[in-house]
């Protein structure tokens, strides 16, 4: 352990986000790598994390279990893995009183309920997108939908790479929630449209997913009225911004009381 620094227990270290986070941790003045975790059948288990980023972080091997010395006060779980893996790791760290930052998406309703339950034991930042710009988009979307009112109909278009497993994206769903929270009446989510007699209900929020190539992430909210429309778009060209936001959240949550937080809390946008 490094004096006066916070250790990161990184779950999903070999993924795209994990590798970006490892690279940033190598030069961070406040955070360091306490443990690098992957699935039990991952081919890199037992290898040094240098196999992932081309740099040597002495003594740090990729493991499938959280080392006992990592389950200490002052560490933070940072999770970009799969829903099943998240639930397994989060149950262990929450029991030890270790706060967590969860960026994994695709949870079932039961898993979401369990995350809320575990956050009563240790603080959890749970956000589908750690980008600072995207979280500002959520705030702008809520303000715009509230100001323009129900006369402006909402549609969301999200684009991601062809390897993304869940659809629609967690970010698109969060963006839809921002719009719905600004409307007094209940809004129904409509996922794509196909067939006949699909006339739009005024309060519907449509979500449309595109999967192609190596698109990192793009989200557009369209608010369309009579004779005009407003479009709010966030485009991501690199996963580094997600990693930077995740580390900012990890630093922020170190001393927070148990509870469920999101990036709006981290950024002071509430």
Image: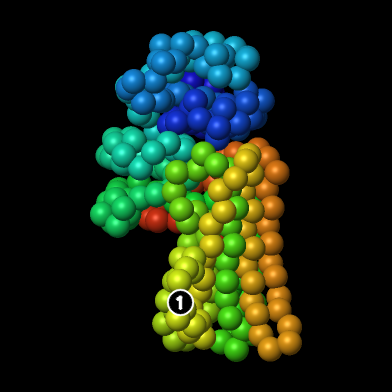
For residue 236, above or below residue 81: below
Front residue of this view, candidates 260 and 181: 181
Residue 64 left/right relative to 60: left
Front residue of this view, candidates 107 and 113: 107
Where residue 47 appears, as percent x and y from the top left, is: 46, 11
Q: How many marks?
A: 1
For residue 144, above or below residue 242: below
Where residue 187 appears, as percent x and y from the top left, is: 44, 79
Q: Is residue 191 among what the camera can see?
A: yes
In terms of image quadrants, where is residue 37? top left
Q: Is residue 4 among what the camera can see?
A: no
Q: Residue at x 64, y 72 (%)?
A: 222
Residue 106 left/right relative to 203: left
Which element is circle 1 on?
Answer: loop
For residue 46, above or below residue 80: above
Front residue of this view, candidates 254 and 35: 35
Where residue 203 appears, as percent x and y from the top left, is: 49, 83
In terms of image quadrants, where is residue 20? top right
Residue where numbered disc 1 is placed: 196
Q: Residues within 10 Å of mark 1 (few under 14, many from 20)?
A: few
Q: Residue at x 41, y 16 (%)?
A: 43
For residue 137, above or below residue 95: below
Where residue 23 appears, as percent x and y from the top left, is: 62, 26
The colour scheme is rainbow
Q: Residue at x 39, y 33 (%)?
A: 73
Q: Residue at x 49, y 25 (%)?
A: 14
Q: Quadrant of the C terminus?
A: bottom right
The residue furthest front is 196
């Amino acid at each position: 352990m490094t004096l006066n620094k916070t250790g990161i227990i990184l779950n999903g270290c070999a993924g795209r986000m994990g590798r970006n986070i490892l690279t940033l941790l190598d030069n961070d003045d406040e955070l360091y790598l306490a443990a690098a975790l992957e699935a039990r059948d991952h081919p890199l288990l037992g290898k040094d994390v240098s196999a992932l980023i081309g740099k040597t972080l002495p003594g740090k091997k990729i493991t499938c279990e959280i080392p006992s010395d990592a389950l200490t006060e002052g560490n933070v779980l940072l999770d970009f893995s799969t829903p099943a893996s998240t639930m397994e790791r989060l149950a262990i760290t929450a029991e030890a009183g270790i706060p967590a930052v969860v960026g994994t998406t695709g949870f079932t309703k039961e898993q979401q309920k369990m995350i809320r339950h575990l956050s009563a034991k240790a603080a959890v930042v749970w956000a589908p997108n750690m980008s600072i710009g995207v979280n500002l988009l959520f705030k702008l979307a809520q303000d715009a939908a509230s100001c323009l009112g129900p006369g402006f109909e909402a549609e969301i278009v999200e684009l991601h790479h062809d390897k993304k497993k869940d659809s629609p994206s967690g970010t698109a769903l969060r963006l839809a929630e921002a719009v719905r929270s600004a409307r007094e009446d209940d809004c129904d989510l409509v996922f794509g449209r196909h067939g006949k007699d699909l006339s739009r209900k005024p309060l519907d929020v449509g979500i449309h997913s595109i999967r192609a190539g190596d698109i990192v992430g793009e989200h557009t909210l369209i608010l369309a009225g009579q004779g005009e429309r407003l479009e709010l778009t966030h485009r991501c060209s690199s996963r580094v911004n997600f990693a930077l936001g995740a580390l900012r959240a990890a630093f922020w949550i170190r001393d927070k009381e148990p509870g469920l937080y999101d990036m709006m809390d981290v950024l002071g946008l509430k």
